[in-house]
Amino acid sequence: MGRIYIFTGKGGVGKSSVAAAHAIKSAEEGRATLLVSTDMAHNLGDIFERRLGREVEKQVLPNLDLYEIDPDYVMEQDFPFVMEYLERLFSDLGMADAPEIGILPGMEELFSLLKIAEIFNKESYERIIVDCAPTGETLSLLKFPELLSWYMKKLFPIGKVGVRVLAPISKAVFQVEMPNRRAMNDIEKMYLKLAELEELLKNRDITSVRIVAMPEKMVVEETKRNYMYLNLYNFHVDGIYINRILPTEIENGFFSQWLVLQKGYITDLKECFEGLPIYEIPWYDEELKGEAAIRRIVEDVLVGKEVFTVTHRSEREHFLKSGEGYQLAVSLPYAKKEEMDLYQAATDLVIRAGNYKRNIPLPNTLYHYVVTAAKFRDGTLYIQFEKGREENESGEN
Ligand SMILES: Nc1ncnc2c1ncn2[C@@H]1O[C@H](COP(=O)(O)OP(=O)(O)OP(=O)(O)O)[C@@H](O)[C@H]1O
Ligand SMILES: [Mg+2]
């Protein structure tokens, strides 16, 4: 089965360069490889010094295909009515004053991920390497399938028949317009795809997330936060890259202070991500443009290493039977207790950490359970559920 490697990190840290180096190595190992960019500001064409079109560019090197996804094109081709409908829906919900695209941020990039899932399922790539946009966008991108499928579950719990019957009254009663049937087919299609996508991205046997960082104060901080959020959304991070490490030979007056600082941040990153494979990449004396330049990373850092093998395994969150009730453990490394919040909504558990909030739908078995305790210990949030009183009082359902 194929595997997906997603490279993420703060802007300008070297995601595209490191992803490209992995793609070259993978192709050289004789594996059918696709390097794909979801960043709207594509630069794979620059790195490989060729013009790329809107479709997959085949055999750029033996075993290596390149693809710069154009989400507008994907949307037009695959989901022509959805955007139109969603735009109307969000404006009905009073969310129209979202950014330019008129919809939630990350919406367009979502189509890139859907496309990747489709390629994964249809084509026979052994490795799909994903070069992402900078962290903020990528996070909203990654949490999007979950968020959107959550919205959809809330908004369209009724089947198509229901929609047809309700459509005329929905505007009056629910203050939102129901999709017309054509859009509904598309929405259903997309809903299924979203569920599939979420499953694919969180499946530890399929998707690895790799974080690229640099030994710099701001980057170290953002990297830790990024790691926490990726954990909050239950992604499997299994590798860290520290890029742009200054060579120690330059120890002279001007750089010596920088060397000391870098050393500190490298130690910091290593301590933070102990247990994860960490790769260190030197700072080169040239811009990494062109295949030859990218190969320097392959030769200096990746050669002879099993960089595609998953050696670190984070466990996928699950509900564990615990005494009379159940326990859910959510890994939240580097989360701050004071920035955390937890509450139970009808059928969801809502966890907030910093600026991000996640709705975890509760399994049916837990509908009558309530959160009785929560404890944050060693970077993990333990949530205890016990049987609530309602059940005895209100009978079934
Ligand atoms: N180790 C390195 N030594 C020298 N230059 C580097 C190194 N890594 C990356 N660069 C250069 O830094 C710039 C940014 O790198 P890259 O495009 O790979 O980063 P990115 O994280 O993908 O950026 P963005 O967030 O804009 O997508 C490029 O010009 C690249 O050639
Ligand atoms: Mg990039």
Image (cartoon, rainbow, N blue to C red):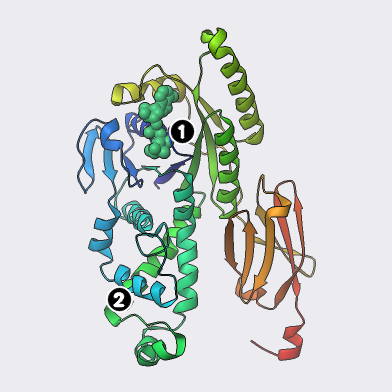
Q: Is residue 358 left or right of residue 286?
A: right
Asked if residue 206 shows in the view, the reply is no
Q: Does 96 sit above or below residue 57?
A: below
Side of 145 relative to 72 (left or right): right
In this view of the protein, which residue sits in the foreground, 320 or 113? Answer: 113
**Residue in the picture at 39% in, 68% down:** 192
Numbered label tally? 2
Give the structural element (helix, strand or loop) at label 1.
loop
Contact (Cβ within 8 Å) of mark 1 with mark 2: no
Disc 1 Cβ-to-ligand 1 distance below 8 Å = yes
Q: Where is residue 133 in the image (x, y as percent from the top left)?
A: 40, 44
Q: How crowded is mark 1: few (under 14 residues within 10 Å), some or many (20 or more)?
A: many
Position of 330 relative to 243 (above/below)? below
At a point 46% along the width and 68% down the height, the residue shown is 149
Q: How far apart are marks 1 and 2 (CA)?
A: 40 Å
Return the residue at label 2.
Answer: 183
Q: Position of residue 264 (x, y in %)?
A: 64, 24
Residue on which the image places disc 1: 13
Residue type, mark 1 in image: Val
Estimate the x, y position of residue 51 in percent, counting from the top left.
Answer: 19, 37
Q: Is residue 385 above or below residue 262?
A: below
Compared to residue 17, the image places residue 355 above or below, namely below
Indicate the secondary structure of the residue bearing disc 2. Answer: helix
Give residue 393's position: percent from left, percent from top: 75, 89
| Front-most of residues 228 and 128 | 228
Image quadrant where one finds the C terminus: bottom right
Q: Residue at x 38, y 20 (%)?
A: 296
Amino acid found under the numbered disc labelled 2: Ala
Q: Foreground residue, 346 or 385?
A: 346
Q: Residues within 10 Å of mark 2 (few under 14, many from 20)?
A: some
